[in-house]
Amino acid sequence: MPAQKINIVDIARKAGVSISTVSRVLNGKAEEFRISEKSQQKIRETAKKLNYVPNQFAASLKSGKSNTIALLIPSLSNPFFADIASEINAEVRNRGYITIIGDSDENKEIENEELVQMQSRNIEGLVIAPCDQNWKGLKKLHDQGLPIVCIDRYFENLDIPYVSTDNYEGATMAIKHLLENGHQRIACIQGVPESVPNKLRIKGYKETMIGAGFNDYQVIGDEFSVQNGYKETKLLLQQKERPTAIFALSNTIAIGCIKALREEELSVPDDISLITFDDHPFLDYLATPLTCITQPTREICRIAIKYLFFMLTNKDIKSSQVLLKPELKYRKSVKRIG
């Protein structure tokens, strides 16, 4: 049988004081009720010896506060969102709160179910990278007073705060780098077509290609996954005139590209150059380290949590829609040709 959980009755009995005295000390009301320092110390020491763990659920019912923030992201298997989850959790923990993390698996029905479950746990705020472009549900929560900040993915025309990377600029940087190295046939393997970051990356890719005089561009793919990168690269290699370079819109897509190229006994960058959006430490340890567009993940998360806690404390946010500058990290996956 499991051990019986220690409660304030046990502490009161062991310390030789009343239950109400224990309750007041542990709930931070000792000064208000003029409880002596000696009694306070005795109660806290007893609680520690008995390994007392407060019932946060009961405390939240009483106070109306849960000290809980929810984070809902599209995929924990994606290294970018795994990093987001780690950074957000650290920032929230540093403020004395805990994080409930949900994974929508890029499915709008799951996302809606997760939101309902999170609300039932009396969350005080929500950080979300929405996979569903139907914003009405989030707008309703926002209008009901729940502090919400969108991260990475967002809604451009809503008054819900968001923090993301300048995805358009990141894509133009990647394509300019390939063009400067002599590449003209540059294929782009995209992620989820409806997501705002994907749309802006595609826009940057297309406009940079057209601006350089190349109208024969190619956009393929439909999700931010290894499988998508693998499948689309296999199809690209069947073309009569294959591309000299591939722009992958995530590092998961890029890993799928590498798998397909290896199966065809083609190497990066000798046979095909490869550049990806998103960075991760593992990109340094590949046979050919990948050149990439890096996102300032830590800064994105810090600003998002700062905004959320501004709203929790009813402080005004001067600028609630922030795009941070990406950087091009040079490695060894782009070859100069021509």
Image (tube, rainbow, N blue to C red):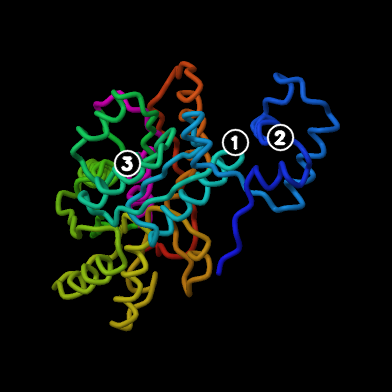
First-in-chain label (1 vs 3): 1
Q: Nearer the viewer, residue 317 or 311?
A: 311
Q: Amino acid at mark 2?
A: Ser
Q: Is residue 43 above or below residue 52?
A: above
Circle 2 or circle 1, nearest the eye:
2
Q: Residue at x 35, y 24 (%)?
A: 145
Residue type at the position of mark 1: Arg
What is the secondary structure assignment of the residue under circle 2?
loop
Q: Which quadrant holds residue 203?
A: top left
Q: Quadrant of the N terminus?
A: bottom right
Q: What amino acid type is highlighted by mark number 3?
A: Arg
Which of the two labelled residues, at mark 2 and mark 1, occupies the earlier sequence position? 2
Query: Left or right of 62: which side holds 140?
Result: left
Which SS class for mark 3? Answer: loop
Task: Specify start and end residues of the magenta stretch as a single range.
Answer: 157-181
Residue at the spot of label 1: 95
List x then y, in percent, for residue 320. 40, 24
Which residue position is annotated with label 3?
Answer: 153
Residue where numbered disc 2 is placed = 18
Q: Is residue 82 above or below residue 262?
A: above
